[in-house]
Image (cartoon, grey):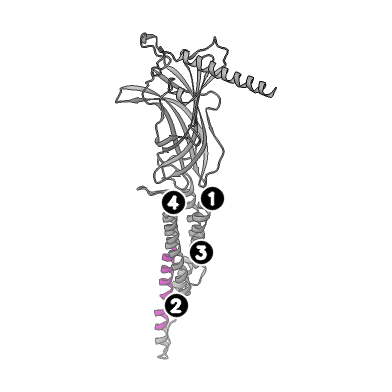
Amino acid sequence: MYLIVLFVSNFGFICGASLEQFTLDSMLNSSYDQRVPPGVDYGKLEESQATIVTVFLDFSQIFDINEGEMDFSVTLDLFQEWTDHRLNFEDSSLEQIQLDQKDIKKVWTPDTFFLQAKNGKLLDISKANTYLHIMKNGSVIYAMRLSLKLSCSMDFHLYPLDKQECKVVIESFGLTLDRLQYAWRERKPVNIQHFNLPLYQIHGPKTSVSTNYHDLTASEYSDLEVTIEFHRAIGYYMTEVFIPDVLIVLLSWVTFWLHPDAVPARVSLGAVTVLTISSQGSAARRYAPKVSYIKAIDIWSLCHILFVFGAMVEFSVVNVLSRKKRPIIEEMFFKSSNNKKIETQDPRPFMKEAKRIDFISRFAFPVVFTLVSAVNGYPVDKNGLMAWDD
């Protein structure tokens, strides 16, 4: 009994496979030309229509965002669907036909490519990750899994408060707008699976449809665009750059509370803070993108260096003023040694002035520093417009 069931099931499978192959061979006869899009009839070009290819993208991985090379890597599934009236098998009992790798080459498929791709490949871990289904009404579903490295024009004026907008553009390599048009799937045309990047947060995606004019062929081509925003995660820079810089500046202000005569303490504190803020700025810029223009991190570091240096300059002024009392004291001592009656002079007018500068600095430096930090930290793009406005 078991052998009979096994024989019947295998016979049914063989018959089904044979029917699929027979139906496919009958459609892919000598009159079918896989080089010609479904909507094109070269015998009646005036009646030809552009083939509509509906696209769905599923990003399974986004990784290796390289700021130096200005590119990023993705692994994605590309789904394309169109109708080829030449592959209609309404009269058959079959509902769909799945083609193997050999038969896929016999069917017309769009010459889709990614405009920003530096390099890429079709994944083939066990075998080529691609399939093609033909439905009863001639609808074709073509899917493939790709690994791509895509270029992205990055702007680091606001680094590390920047966001990068990277576009993924799909276009036909050779078929013009009147031969092939792309369209996004109506329901969620792009899916980005949830995963965490060390230094970025992913926002989007945003989709659009456009055309691209090529001067070389003097023709327009259909484009699909996906915009993915990478917002830089600020947590790392808060702990490694911003908070340490602010603490060093606050430490430099301790000199305002020391007595003007405490020269060794004020000199030591000033020298330490200047050297520390300089090395801190160098460390912050070491891992920053190497570009020729000024970035926000450069302005931030320069402002903090200037505030620490300003505290040193303030001490120099206070020290000069406080030392001016000594010639007056020496003159008073010389006159009194002659046992003559002299008029005493106030030896401390400049000391009072020095203390007054210290007192003013205790409030002036924090107020100015707060204002500068607020302006420096607010995201403004290179054109002077407020950034991150959605």
Q: Which mark is residue 235?
A: 1
Name the spot of residue 61 as percent of width and height, x first: 51, 38
Question: Disc 3 marks which residue?
Answer: 251
User: Whole-Å distance between the Cαs marked 3 and 4?
Assistant: 21 Å
Q: Which residues are magenta?
A: 310-330
Gap in angstroms between the C-alphas marked 1 and 2: 54 Å
Depth check: give the residue in front, 249 or 103.
103
Label 3 crowd bin: few (<14), some (14–19), many (20+), radius 10 Å: some
| Coordinates of residue 159 in the picture (x, y in percent) | 44, 47
Residue 95 vertical placement versus 302 (above, below): above
- Residue visible at 57% across and 15% down? 94
Tell me the element at label 3: helix
Badge 4 crowding class, 10 Å Cα cut-off, few under 14, some 14 to 19, many 20 or more, is many
Of circles 2 and 3, which is in front? Answer: 3
51 vs 202, left or right, is left
Q: What separation in Å lies between label 2 and label 4 (alpha carbons)?
A: 48 Å
Q: Earlier in the sequence, mark 2 or mark 4?
A: 4
Q: Residue at label 4? A: 297
Residue 102 sits in which quadrant?
top left
Q: What's under tag 4, amino acid-wise? A: Ile
Q: Is residue 325 magenta?
A: yes
Residue 191 at what x, y percent from top left? 54, 32
Residue sticking out furthest to the left? 216
Residue 185 appearing in the image = yes
Tell me the kind of residue under disc 3. Leu
Question: In the rendered structure, which disc, 2 or 3, sits on the residue that comes first in sequence?
Answer: 3
